[in-house]
Image (tube, grey):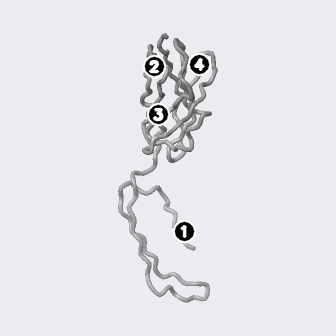
Amino acid sequence: LLTLTPMVPLAGFTAYTVTIAGVKDLSGNALAINVTASFTTETGADLVNPTVTSVTPVNGATGVPTSTVVTITFSERVNSLSVTDLNFFVQTSSGVRVAGSIAVEADGLSATFTPSAALANSTVYQVQASSLTDLVGQALSFFFFSSFTTAAP
């Protein structure tokens, strides 16, 4: 097994060629041929944490239907396995969590919370998200909080 480790990070969007020649086994036998491999790097290291860029219903919305589905949109793809009911949820202003299900879109750019039953009328609900991670494991850069009020009966 031969592992090559660069001394500095490779540049993004760059073609590289690696040639291995003159390698000998423990008995001194030389490798019969040179081995060449080529590859192109991608965008480079992801050093940006994801953020929530929008929420539906919008923060402070009033008269929201009791059948609403909450959607949060992210600045970059998130790891769907990191989006759980522990870090993305809806609760009443008194802290009672709403039962429901979470789904992350296939592109990883948004997640929805669908309540199991209709929300209560004339009630303030809070949407919270934290610790969700992107595809390289970086967490949301801040705790996300939003609220909305459902319609009167």
Give the mark, 4 or 1, whose residue is nearer the N terminus: 1
Residue at 42 percent of width and 30 percent of height: 53
Task: Characterize the local packing of mark 3: few (<14), some (14-19) or many (20 or more) Cα atoms within 10 angstroms.
Answer: many
Give the mark, 1 or 2, whose residue is nearer the N terminus: 1
Which of the two marks, 3 or 1, is nearer to us in this view?
Answer: 3
Contact between marks 1 and 2 (CB within 8 A): the answer is: no
Residue at 46 percent of width and 40 percent of height: 48
Question: What is the CA distance from the residue labelled 1 to the residue labelled 2?
Answer: 58 Å
User: Label 2, on which residue?
Assistant: 65
Which of the two marks, 4 or 1, is nearer to us in this view?
Answer: 4
Q: Is residue 141 above or below residue 18?
A: above
Residue type indicated by callout 2: Pro
Question: What is the CA distance from the residue labelled 2 to the residue labelled 3?
Answer: 26 Å
Residue type indicated by callout 1: Thr
Q: Secondary structure at mark 1?
A: loop
Query: In the depicted view, which residue is nearer to us: 101 or 133?
Result: 101
x and y, in percent, of residue 82 in the image = 57, 41
Give the mark, 2 or 3, whose residue is nearer the N terminus: 3
Task: Characterize the local packing of mark 2: few (<14), some (14-19) or many (20 or more) Cα atoms within 10 angstroms.
Answer: some
Q: Is residue 28 above or below residue 35?
A: below
Q: Is residue 61 above or below residue 127?
A: above
Question: What is the CA distance from the residue labelled 3 to the residue labelled 1?
Answer: 36 Å
Residue type indicated by callout 3: Thr
Residue 51's disc is: 3
User: Label 1, on which residue?
Assistant: 3
Task: Characterize the local packing of mark 1: few (<14), some (14-19) or many (20 or more) Cα atoms within 10 angstroms.
Answer: few
Query: In the depicted view, which residue is nearer to us: 79 or 4?
Result: 79
User: Label 4, on which residue?
Assistant: 92
Query: In the depicted view, which residue is nearer to us: 95 or 25?
Result: 95
Question: What is the CA distance from the residue labelled 4 to the residue labelled 1?
Answer: 54 Å
